[in-house]
Image (spheres, grey):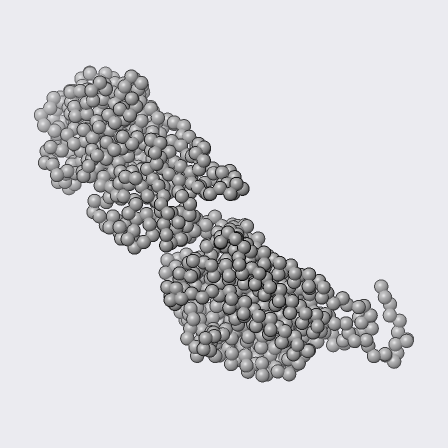
Amino acid sequence: MNKPLRRIAIFCGILILALLVRTNYLQYVRADELNSRDENRRVRIERYAHERGNIIVDGNPVTGSVETKGSDFKYKRVWKNGAMWAPVTGYSSQAFDASQLESIEDGILTGNDDQLFFDRTLSMFTGGKKQGGNVVTTLNGAAQKAAFKGLGSKKGAVAALDPQTGAILALVSTPSYDPSVFAGNSDKDSKARQKLLADKDKPMLNRALRETYPPGSTFKVVTAAAALENGLYKGIDDKTNSPLPWRLPLTTGNLDNEGNIPCENASLREALRWSCNTVFGKISDDLGNQKMIDEANKFGFNEEIFTPVRADASVYPKDNRPQNAMAGIGQASNRATPLQMAMVAAAVANDGKLMQPYMVAERQAPNLDVIYTHEKEQFSQPLSGENAQKLQQMMETVVKKGTGTNALINGVTVGGKTGTAQHGLNNSENPYAWFISYAKTDSGSPVAVAVVVEDSQANRDDISGGGLAAPIARDVMKAVIDSKK
Amino acid sequence: MSVVTNTTTIGAIDAPSRRNTELMMMGFAIAISVFAYANVGLAIDGKLPSGMFGYGAGLILLGGVAHLVVRKFAPYADPLLLPLATLLNGLGLVLIWRLDQSQRLIQRAEYLYGEYSPDAPKQLLYSAIGVAFFVAVLVILKDHRILQRYTYISMAVALVLLILPMFFPAVNGAKIWISLGPFTIQPGEFAKILIAVFFSGYLMVKRDALALASRRFMGMYLPRGRDLGPIITIWALSILILVFETDLGTSLLFFGLFVVMLYVATERTSWIVFGLLMSAVGAVGVASFEPHVQSRVNAWLDPFAKATMEQSDQIAQSLMAFGSGGTLGTGLGQGHSDLIMFAANADFILSTVAEELGLAGMMAILLIYGLIVERGVRTALAARDPFGKLLAIGLSGAFAIQIFVVAGGVMGLIPLSGMTMPFLAYGGSSVLANWALIAILIRISDTARRPAPAPAPSPDAEMTQVVRP
């Protein structure tokens, strides 16, 4: 009977071995995967087990943590002026996970990031309390406030950049939401979030990064850059070959201008000043779809931008001739995020060099040691320094004596471009009012900004980038310049 | 196996009793448990738990009594079985006490039942009764062969125990419980031992018929039709358990036990092949129409599926507890295995081991169970009578299969079933039955290792020269 006994012993050994292998598989091979699952409440318990690190603007935190009772989450996230900062910070909710910076920088904020390994180990031995690190942003509180106030109850978005570094200075989306209302874990939080999600104005949509609009006439800046870069026209004051009226290629209709403006064979400078559809439509057609796509891509179109918060890809698609001509004036299937249009203005302002936009300047360990500093990085060079300066002159003319006079600031050189994008079936809905601009001082350009106002109660004829959006852009630029003094 | 019991060489070497080894190991087992207890207190409250002295004293008392009884009534018994069981029982108490402190579980109990009562004191009581069982078995059962007389009574009692739960309401979907007033009993745990006794007695008598009368077919010895009777009966019973009590684990345990013992008794591999085929057919067949079994299988196949999570997230929670433990674990009292909620300290106690003691602790616990099985198999090898051999292998085989079924279910290796980890998990039936099981193994090992009585002087002794190496 001993032979089968030995075999049974081996069989029992195999059973135990199978369990040993399985536990190794679960606890070693799959540990990370199991540990980071959405279903795993430990992730959230850990996230709120300690005071969460803060997101810092201008040296002051715009976030905080308060202790809570009655659940397994010890702390709750709170925001200072949450509605204004939500497009930057995102939310961090005990019940509903986190978004944007709160999610991307979760490792630093909870103190679990590998970069903090040394601190963690040290505090384990010294018995220190575990703490999260801070995330220092590039944002400018005054500019953010100016943009938020400027948009007020209107629906829209503002993105402002430092053209020389790519630092994001303002990022506003209205209507906004206060992430504090659903930061907790109760029914009340759940209802508040449901209400926000059901709101038809989409307050939780980050319009500055995640909504693409038809760019309207502001896109003419890109078209002008393409004309100069491809050598279609050399001088900005030379006459262009632009008949008026101009028939949209392969169609029976004319491309009209807004009103009776001097566009026939107008120079680039004059064409931008008056916002001539015929001139820029023809430039786009003369260059052809591929060259327009190439130039748009250099400005950042057709790819997602990570700031590190993801911005949707703006698009300039392959299209037929008439559509491509219309796209040259921003009225076809090309679409852009406010951040994208701010990048366009920034590239021009920075003499043709487009810097990678970013909003995290530093990461700090819990003891405030800086463990990461952003190094500025060039994204691309959409146009040469020479051509950029030509384009600057054109945009400055727009503000001095064109459609953008509302953006003038005393003692500062401002360049800009207005835009009024039609949309809806047969352009039936309120157009989008656009304004993109930059300010320039002796030490280069400190700020470039894009403003879009989605709709308004105002009479639709009155909606123009110059009237609605330019004053907001001016206030944002002024806030940045004043804060540098 | 040999029916010739001894030759003159065996008795001449004086077998050591190993009782002092056992005593030392008991010291270890109790020290580890008390240390773990202190650990939990320090982690949760930041100070040594006030109940530590009482807990330590209780364990020393239980362990001491058990050891003294073994010293007196089974002096040649295997020295490892008792310390291993004590260690598991002690650690189990610590884990249950740790889960008693869980705010989550306290809130849940207050919400569901309006009141909360800790389980650790009850488990300590069960452990005391379990050790009393252990003592009683060793004192009363002077020789395991006495059990052979109760072959058919065991069968009858076992059948009653297995059938009874069908008449009681299902708990968490499976009908493996009977409730008597305030107590609930899991009769499967006791039936396990009785069935092993019955199979041993039955197979010892029938094994020759089952082994020898066979036809050869495709290189295998197939049993005759009429000898297939018993295995088909047991198979049918397992299927009935599966259908009416909807518990895959219990069903697998009994059928596996029978196949193992049949194979040992007859030495015919064909029984294993038959057994595997039949259990596969049975399991697949029942799973195809029994919704409870189906849902268990689905939960096993995809524990994180939305449908599964809505029904019960236990397996998913258990897997995540394993993952969170990692290599070294969070430390006792610092994990969140209580997220499993229902049966966290019973069926799912291993998840707490995995999360708080980590991969290291999990391997240690599994190896302790492995060691118990190994000592049981060794006892079977050493036993001199076929009944003892069969009983020892049956009990250790059942033990091994139960470990596999429960741990495998908790780890998502096989579908979950409603049994518990012996000694570690909360539950009176389990503790009582397993202490009794260890007592029987100790009794068999004592008989096996006991020096044979000096042989009667053989008439031709002087003519035989024993050559010693």
Residue A222 relative to residue B55: left or right: left
At x 72%, y 70%, the residue is B76
A234 or A119: which is nearer to us? A119
A105 or B138: which is nearer to us? B138
Hey, which quadrant is residue A456 in on the image?
A: top left
* A350 shown above or below A109: above
At x 68%, y 61%, the residue is B24
* A416 shown above or below A86: above
Q: Quadrant of the N terminus of chain B?
A: bottom right
Hey, which quadrant is residue B212 in on the image?
A: bottom right
Residue A44 relative to residue B145: left or right: left
A45 or B390: which is nearer to us? A45
- Counting labels gives 0
At x 21%, y 37%, the residue is A156
Residue B385 relative to residue B246: left or right: right
Q: Position of residue B423 (x, y in %)?
A: 56, 66
Q: Position of residue A251 (x, y in %)?
A: 15, 33
Residue B122 in sight here: yes
